[in-house]
Image (cartoon, helix red, strand yellow):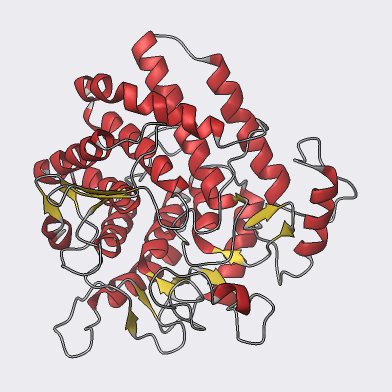
């Protein structure tokens, strides 16, 4: 919890308490995740910083409803993204607003934020483009901003579902009645995710197939997997097939997956991904190597310097962040023994020294082969992941809205 407190400023949580690049800014994505951890602690200063984080982001909302990717309040600089906007900034903002309100019962906050919340909800609907229920996400448009996926990305769809649940909870509380349109939209989105991102050996496309021809392409792409897991994305150019760990964890944690699907993903993670020496989840798997077809495209996907060498960063790097959410998922399903092993790996990763510095560097990720720290340190959300994991082991769910664990 000490690092979370080091990320506290008068304007909200910064991504990291260091003056490097733009990490000492208020980020929607990082701030949302740090807020989940802060609310679990119940610490008054951290809970208050959650509120300030969300208010700072809302104050800089764009004309069409865009929540900033990050804000530097002292320098009066606002970014809505790099080469593309960050769709998940809006999603994490809505989810964090919902979790803050549910944890605190702060109705005054909800009423003040309602205009910003409604604008975000409208904008997300516009980003469906063809009004068929799934968000379109451009390349570099979410947390994996240097990786090769785009289109209908699973990670964003699952967060979109949780955002819809939050909007429904707000409406029910403020109006004393259920918004049936929002309920129907949430139900439809859950069915779309289940029908279009999970493939079995069934003969034909399900009734909720987004597009029949595209679904058949997905069935062929699914054959490239080594086991059953949720497909990462699809677009008019076809389906991706690499394992997206964050998406596969969230699809379980947010109650889209059923128990048989969870069991298949668990088996894949334990047999193919997790090394007993350092049990952490990689961002994506398998690693893209220089001889792979995707390598040339991957090499163009960066803002400053190329970081996605094999087993580094998002290309097979091991992430405390993702592991913390998986610990929460496993603990919530009663798989405490496996959750404890991963939590021990998460704590060991956070405790590693960076170069010749002291221990507890809270690195952004570890190299997938050497287990050496990489990226920015100390990273706020690596600490948040540990807080989330430890509180999950005590029976506290990370999400309070819309799941059977709430």
Q: Position of residue 395 (x, y in %)?
A: 33, 47
For the residue pair 402 and 292, the one nearer the viewer reads as 292
Decide if residue 313 is on the left or right side of residue 361: right
Horizontally, residue 366 falls left or right of residue 387, namely: right
- Residue 8 position in % (x across, y down): 13, 52
The C terminus lies in quadrant: top left
Estimate the x, y position of residue 390 in percent, counting from the top left: 28, 58
145 or 226, which is in the foreground?
A: 145
Asked if residue 65 lies left or right of residue 197, the reply is left
> Looking at the picture, how far across and down is residue 393, in whole percent?
33, 55
Q: Is residue 185 above or below residue 4?
A: above
The image quadrant that residue 356 belongs to is bottom left
Could you tell me which residue is drawn at 41 percent across and 83 percent down? 367
- Write the residue at 45% across / 29% down: 121
- Quadrant of the image containing the N terminus: bottom left
Q: Residue at x 84, y 44 (%)?
A: 212
- Residue 50 to residue 392: above or below: above
- Residue nearest the observer in this picture, 82 or 55: 82
In the depicted view, which residue is nearer to us: 301 or 385?
Answer: 301
């Amino acid at each position: 919890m000490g690092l979370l407190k080091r990320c506290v400023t008068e304007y909200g949580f910064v991504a990291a308490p260091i003056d490097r690049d733009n990490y000492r800014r208020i980020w929607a994505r990082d701030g949302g995740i740090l807020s989940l951890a802060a609310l679990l602690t119940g610490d008054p200063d951290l809970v208050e910083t959650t509120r300030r984080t969300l208010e700072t982001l809302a104050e800089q909302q764009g004309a069409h409803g865009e929540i900033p990717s990050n804000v530097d309040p002292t320098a009066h600089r606002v970014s809505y993204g790099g080469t593309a906007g960050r769709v998940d900034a809006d999603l994490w903002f809505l989810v964090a607003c919902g979790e803050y309100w549910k944890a605190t019962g702060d109705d005054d906050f909800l009423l003040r934020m309602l205009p910003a919340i409604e604008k975000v909800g409208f904008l997300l609907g516009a980003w469906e483009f063809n009004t068929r229920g799934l968000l379109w996400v451009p390349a570099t448009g979410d947390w994996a901003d240097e990786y090769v996926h785009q289109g209908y990305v699973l990670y964003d769809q699952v967060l979109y579902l949780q955002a819809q649940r939050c909007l429904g909870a707000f409406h029910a509380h403020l109006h004393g009645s259920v918004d049936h349109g929002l309920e129907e939209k949430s139900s439809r989105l859950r069915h779309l995710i289940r029908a279009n991102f999970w493939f079995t050996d069934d003969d034909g496309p399900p009734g909720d197939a987004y597009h029949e021809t595209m679904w058949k392409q997905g069935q062929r792409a699914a054959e490239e997997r080594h086991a059953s897991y949720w497909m990462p994305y699809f677009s008019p150019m076809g389906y991706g097939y690499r394992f997206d760990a964050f998406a596969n964890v969230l699809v379980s944690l947010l109650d889209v997956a059923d128990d048989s699907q969870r069991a298949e993903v668990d088996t894949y993670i334990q047999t193919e991904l997790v090394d007993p020496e350092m049990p952490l989840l990689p961002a994506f798997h398998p690693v893209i190597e220089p001889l792979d077809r995707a390598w040339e495209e991957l090499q163009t996907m960066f803002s400053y310097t190329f970081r996605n060498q094999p087993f580094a960063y998002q290309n097979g790097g091991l992430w405390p962040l993702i592991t913390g959410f998986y610990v929460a998922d496993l603990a919530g399903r009663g798989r405490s023994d496996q959750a404890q092993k991963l939590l021990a790996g998460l704590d060991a990763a956070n405790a590693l020294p960076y170069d010749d510095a002291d221990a507890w560097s809270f690195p952004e990720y570890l190299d997938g082969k050497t287990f050496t720290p990489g990226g920015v340190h100390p990273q706020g959300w690596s600490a948040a992941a540990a807080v989330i994991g430890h509180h999950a082991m005590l029976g506290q769910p990370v999400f309070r809205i819309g799941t059977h664990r709430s």
